[in-house]
Amino acid sequence: MNPRTLLTRPWIWGFAAAALVWAIIFAISGQGGGQTVSLAFSLAPYLVIVGLGQMLVITAGPGNIDVSVASVISLAGFVSVAVASATGSATVGILAGIGAGIAIALISTVAILGLSIPPIIATLAAGLVASSITLSIADGFTAVPDAGLRWLLNLRPAGVPLPAVAVVLLTVLVALVLRRTVYGRSLIAVGQNRRAAERAGIPVARVIAATYLASGALAGLAGALLAAYIAPSPDLGTRYLLDSVAVVVIGGTLISGGRAVPPGVWGAALFFILLDGLVNLVGWSTAAQNLLKGGLVLFVLFLAGGGDRVVRPAPRAGGDRQPEAQRS
């Protein structure tokens, strides 16, 4: 493959890494290759949903990150199951979970845009609010996930998990929004240069607000579906904070903003799910797994920043100054 293609299509790396890990698992275990892929496609959609929201936030530019997603997932899981049990409608329950995510994201948005609080602090505070509410709801919680929704989430038409099909369509929708809508083009412009976007008349505050609200809604959706697929618990979303950032970065989205790669989130999510399977197969602890994931993220960030590191020439003898055009 042409190296230029790998640079212009960074999403390829995630799928290539996933294929490599799958081959290693198959070589070690000697069986279950198809089952491993099927399990990966069963678990990856929930990470992809959260990752797509995190991708939008990171695309908004330096400093933008949503660290409330883990708490939102846990809260949305309880809210969704409780509302679905009370109303008898799984659809209403899912909408309630999404609404819970949007409500927490609204707190972050007001803090970021109205109070000029840095996004990482604002979303951390909003996450603490969500965690407090979650613990209150979890105390004495007796509702059970909707059986019909759980059946749908385990449905496999033609052997492919139904959630995977739905989330692939969601990924395509997000890609179209980024490419074909005013919001999508505005978000890319804001991420590339916020000041230039403001001078061009782009409503930056509105774009940022919509982005954080979208992230909250997607995290809420993931929580609602996860609670039905597994069960609601206060730590339901714990692993999704690090993983959601990791799949975005490894998937090719620039951590500095201005470039979003929705397909890359899928490739990186499959890679991470398979990587979890591999390290469990060889007996690694959870702490070691998180250390490996963190190291991978740092490695990708190091590679991504390699092109920005410019070696500045030493000053010329005699104090001659470089021409203005040559200064970096």
Image (spheres, grey):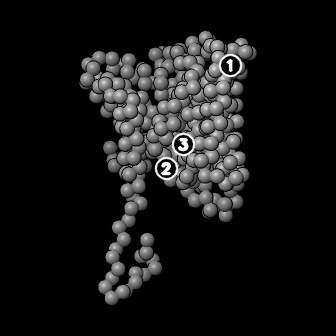
Residue 195 in percent (x, y) is at: 62, 62
Amino acid carrying mark 3 in the image: Met
Residue 128 in percent (x, y) is at: 61, 37
Left or right of residue 322, residue 198 in this image: right
Q: Which mark is residue 82?
A: 1
- Earlier in the chain: of badge 2 and badge 3, it is 3
> Considering the numbered disc 3 on the image, is that residue within a helix, a strand or a loop?
helix
| Picture residue at 43% right of the left edge, 24% below the top | 40
- Earlier in the chain: of badge 2 and badge 1, it is 1
- Per the model, the C-alpha gap separating discs 3 and 1 is 29 Å
Look at mark 3 in the image and give the residue it sits on.
Answer: 55
| Picture residue at 39% right of the left edge, 23% below the top | 37
User: Of discs 3 and 1, which sits in the foreground?
Assistant: 1
Label 3 with label 1: CB-CB less than 8 Å: no
Residue 105 in percent (x, y) is at: 66, 39
Look at mark 2 in the image and give the residue it sits on.
Answer: 255
Q: Is residue 148 visible?
A: yes
Residue nearest the observer in this picture, 148 or 65: 65
- Say which quarter of the image contains residue 213: top right
